[in-house]
Image: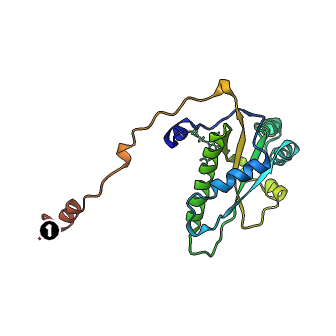
Amino acid sequence: MDVMTAILTRRSSHLLSDPGPTDAEFTYLLGGAATAPDHGALRPWRWVLLRGDGRAALGDCLAAEGPPDQRDRVRRKMLRSPLKAVLIFVPRPDHRVQEWEQLAGTSSMVYAMMMLLHARGYGSIWRTGALCRSTGVRELLGLSSAERVLGSLDIGTPDEKARRSRRPREDVAAKVSAFDAAAVTAARTGGPAGP
Ligand SMILES: Cc1cc2nc3c(=O)[nH]c(=O)nc-3n(C[C@H](O)[C@H](O)[C@H](O)COP(=O)(O)O)c2cc1C
């Protein structure tokens, strides 16, 4: 599959079942994803992999923090994929590379990971929501005060019947402009550019 085809056929998968990648396979793919652009090569992130009862413990934490009538629904949501990989941002606060750049590098790594999973036939979806705000989840996963949950990558085998169609290429021409130095200079000086 060429890179453009891989990019256009990757879709976030909402219905995911067994099998998912093993921990070793996840780590192998992460070795590739970690080569994504990363200013300062800080790798300011880590992953915690949850399966089975681990996902249920996550659900219990979130259910305890939400409205009582939503508890079962919240618990079920944590079980929607065989592997729930929680992404933790570990910024280096005093580094010359600013935090937003560290976050941008982390996002690049996640997208690379999603593409590598897709190339192996796995589906994934980046989910955020209450997981990112939960103090119970922070305690459960042992986050330090400087760390931040950026959500999870839910990973598994996509349901063939629910497979979403290839994304058409968007018309992004309006998002691109070519800088015209002569025109800008003329506009600023009130006359034609050049000698
Ligand atoms: C930072 C981030 C957070 C996201 N959080 C959620 C989420 O909480 N729930 C969800 O269903 N999808 C979430 N998504 C997935 C997007 O909804 C999805 O990528 C978008 O609908 C486009 O679909 P596609 O990935 O198939 O192109 C998130 C995506 C990103 C990049």
Which percent across, then down, holds residue 71? 82, 39
Q: Is residue 112 left or right of residue 17?
A: left
Q: Nearer the viewer, residue 16 or 7?
A: 7
Looking at the picture, which amino acid does disc 1 mark?
Answer: Gly
Q: Is mark 1 within 8 Å of ligand 1?
A: no
Task: Identify the residue at the far front of this view.
Answer: 1
Task: Identify the residue at the far top of this view.
Answer: 161
Q: Secondary structure at mark 1?
A: loop
Quarter of the image where ligand 1 sits: top right
Residue beneath the point at 56% across and 71% down:
97
| Image quarter in which the C terminus is found | bottom left
Q: Quadrant of residue 145?
A: bottom right
Instruction: From the image, tell me which residue sits under label 1.
Output: 194
Q: Is residue 95 above or below residue 17?
A: below
Which percent across, then down, holds residue 125? 66, 41
Residue beneath the point at 66% across and 43% down:
117
Which percent across, then down, holds residue 96? 56, 75
Residue beneath the point at 68% across and 50% down:
29
Q: Is residue 173 left or right of residue 10?
A: left
